[in-house]
Image (tube, rainbow, N blue to C red):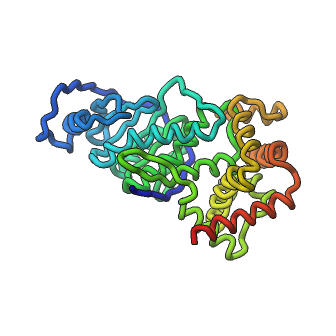
Amino acid sequence: MRKFSLIFIVIISLAGCSGTDKIEIKGINNTQRLDTGAGMAAYLQGQALHDLKSVEVWNNSYAPGLKLTTTHYEIFTTLLEPFVLRGISGFIESAYRAYNSQLPESIETKSKFTIYLFAQRSQWENFTKSFAGEQAEIFCKIKAGAYYHKGACVVYDIGIERTFSALGHEGWHQFNGRCFKFRLPSWLDEGIAMLFETHGSDGGLFYFEPTENMYRLDGLKRTLTKNKMIPLKELISMNPGDVLATNQTKAVMAFYSQSYALVRFLQEAGYGRWRGVYRRLLLDGLTGDWELDEVNKRIATDRNVPKTVLWNRIVGRGLFEDYVGDNFEQIEKEYLAFCRQIINTQY
């Protein structure tokens, strides 16, 4: 049994891909070179991977590449690493099922999600500069990890454990970005995404363990110990841009670790006391049934309209009050007790 964890950073998406040449291989020649698209495709087809539906050569301007197709995803990659490619189809389909587990009932997407996985950061940056336009400069400042932009997850290899953690996180943004009628406020969107940063594998099967996310738990412990906790009213009104723009590592750590803890609080605290309202909150976001005024509803539904700091502040707090409650003094007391509980359990 293996357990993996970590990561960070998101933001955005893309569209477009180069042509692919499909190859049909009846038998596998074990002497095939694995540093070529055709050779790696032949190798993967011989592995009988359950979640991998097809493999094609991906013609692109960066490096020899492949297009891997699963039930719900198309993965365009220049990373010809057997260990990663044997696992990625099973990992991402496991993630899709895990995203669905947040909802009262599973849903099905009508078209496949797109992932770009590059072998080198230089390829990732060149791709980003070509397709992300004015946003490219921002994305290229990401030190390690991935981003979500216009429907696609874009990542480069940072080691299998961290790469899969980044995909687990960004994949949630991709999933709800397409499937939910309303976009989620930042505390909720980021908090849920961090549930998929820690995974394990057993016999080739992947599972997620949010309670084992030591990266976020360590951040939470540091924030608590140094008495730097963001008040609950502020936390649910914040946008990641508020803290990322300050370039203050401790503030960023506090926002993300506390959002992670808040989602876990709603799922776990008091023997699941808040779990019902948490699921209703997500279900109503999925179906577009939040009680919003026309201006905020338009921003919630139209992904082409920027999610402003003001929108996040109004909707983030308003939804919390509507579904969880407005007795912030009591809720925050219970939330802080839960935060202490989960870090004491791990340390």
Q: Is residue 6 left or right of residue 39?
A: right
The image quadrant that residue 216 belongs to is: bottom right
Q: How many marks?
A: 0
The residue located at (85%, 57%) in the rendering is 328
The residue located at (66%, 64%) in the rendering is 254
The location of residue 175, given as percent across then percent down, is: 56, 36
Farthest residue in the bottom direction? 226
The location of residue 32, given as percent across then percent down, is: 14, 39
Farthest residue in the front direction? 271
The location of residue 98, given as percent across then percent down, is: 54, 41
The residue located at (43%, 29%) in the rendering is 71
The image quadrant that residue 126 belongs to is: top left
The location of residue 132, given as percent across then percent down, is: 50, 40
The residue located at (74%, 40%) in the rendering is 281
Front one among 150 and 277: 277
Decide: is 40 above or below 195. above
Q: Is residue 291 visible?
A: yes
Q: Is residue 120 left or right of residue 15?
A: left
Quadrant of the image containing the C terminus:
bottom right
Q: Is residue 187 left or right of residue 163?
A: right
Front one among 252 and 217: 217
Q: Is residue 304 visible?
A: no
Quadrant of the image containing the N terminus:
bottom left
